[in-house]
Amino acid sequence: FDAVSVIATKRDGGALSDAQIDWVVEAYTAGEVADEQMSALAMAIVINGMDRHEIARWTEAMIATGHRMDFSGLRRAGSPLRTVDKHSTGGVGDKITLPLGPLVASYGLAVPQLSGRGLGHTGGTLDKLESIPGWRADLTTAEMTAALEKVGAVVCAAGADLAPADRKLYALRDVTATVESIPLIASSIMSKKIAEGTSALVLDVKVGSGAFMKTEPDARELAETMVALGHDSGVDTVALLTRMDAPLGRTAGNALEVAEALEVLAGGGPADVVELTLALATEMLALGGITGVDPADHLADGTAMDRWRAMIREQGGDPDAPLPVAAHTETVTVPAGGVIESIDAMAVGVAAWRLGAGRARQGEPVAAEAGVVIHARPGETVASGAPMFTLHAADPSRFAGAIAALTDAVRVGDHTVEIPHRVIDRV
Ligand code: URA
């Protein structure tokens, strides 16, 4: 094969053969297909799509570039431990993994979360947890296994040999406007989750302005594609379609989101974050064979918080250490008095990113303390001149760009608005 003919096949709307897919994924990972060739192919896939068979083969080919993990031997007190994971397609203010992992683990399941870092305007779980002094994302497989057997919840970076094709392709897509593609997102997420070796998986597929999928039909197709990929590989997979028009909760940024997750673990926190945490926990527990419990109980009685503290300590973090605080803050007021009709998640995500919570270039450090606090939520009534956002940054030169991003982020009207639930449907 040669890369040019593979690109031309997809450019002209054809289906790639199994052999073409196996070759191009392997050769790109090995450095024999150049970045500019893979970016042309990725763009052809964005434009012309892939059928289900091509997506399944592409996913298998990405898995085959690395090693599969195996948690089937996990034991606690001599009994096998069942693994259940969750993955979100990416959102703004999405800190759900932080309370969810310990909550589900507190019912006796093992949650082997291999998480990512921020991508574009969306935050990454590892970046958030790294705002906790001492906490380490890089664990060996032996450390991960020990943490699962002891604590039940672990959040760590994928090792270099877990779907290395995705690691390379993901970085390329990030800088070539080729993220927003159902085949590419589905294969990216599922290659990592299948290689991770979880026996069950709950997907949180985001829909709306702050998500990669802007419409419900697209999100549904993404969800169905991923659920089918999971089932074909023996992973018990369920997806929830959830709204990402407004940011989740009241914070976007790393340490700010950890603080909000702690409120949820303490039995409080914003209603939408709690709703989604409990909906995903219920699905995970059911896949793990645990029914007839109300996961809200372990948020209310401190059991999930105890598990969180154990999880943070197990990975070198100090759960009692103060979180980093921004040296500079700036307040943005509401555009007018009235009822908040909407807050654009994308605008808030871009603002947090520009404040330093995300990266402009691959591999850059993020500012733990940077981000946005949202004072009023959709449906709330605000007086003219009331605070809308507080911006947090290490460097005040960041404020202008963030304020520009937020210019039209908030719509205020004069009628009460119905705030829909976050969960739209289950696939
Ligand atoms: N998350 C991933 O891991 N991959 C994508 O392509 C999009 C979101």
Image (cartoon, rainbow, N blue to C red):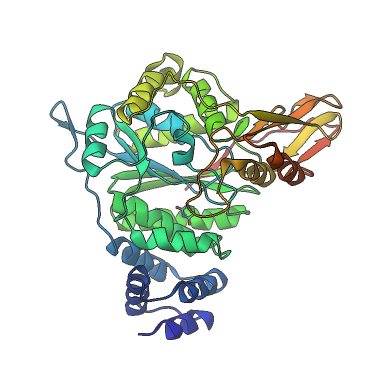
Q: Quadrant of residue 101?
A: top left
Instruction: Give the residue at x 65% y 45%.
Output: 354
Q: In which quarter of the view is residue 275 placed?
A: top right
Give the left or right position of residue 319, taking residue 342 as reference.
left
Residue 313, how many percent across, how many down?
33, 25
**Image location (x, y in percent) of residue 273:** 55, 30
Instruction: Describe residue 163's horizontal placement relative to residue 268 as left or right.
Output: left
Q: Is residue 14 left or right of residue 244?
A: left
At x 39%, y 22%, the residue is: 304
Say which quadrant the N terminus sits in: bottom left
- Residue drawn at 66 percent across, 49 percent down: 209
Taking depth in this image into account, of 400 and 186 the one nearest to the observer is: 400
* Above or below, 364 relative to 381: below
Q: Position of residue 222 (x, y in %)?
A: 50, 56
Q: Is residue 308 visible?
A: yes
Q: How many marks?
A: 0
Q: Residue furthest top?
A: 301
Work out whether 289 lies above or below 8.
above
Residue 291 visible in the shown view: no
Residue found 58% across the figure and 30% down from its top: 272
Image spot of residue 184 (x, y percent): 47, 63
The reply, left or right, for residue 114 in relation to residue 267 is left
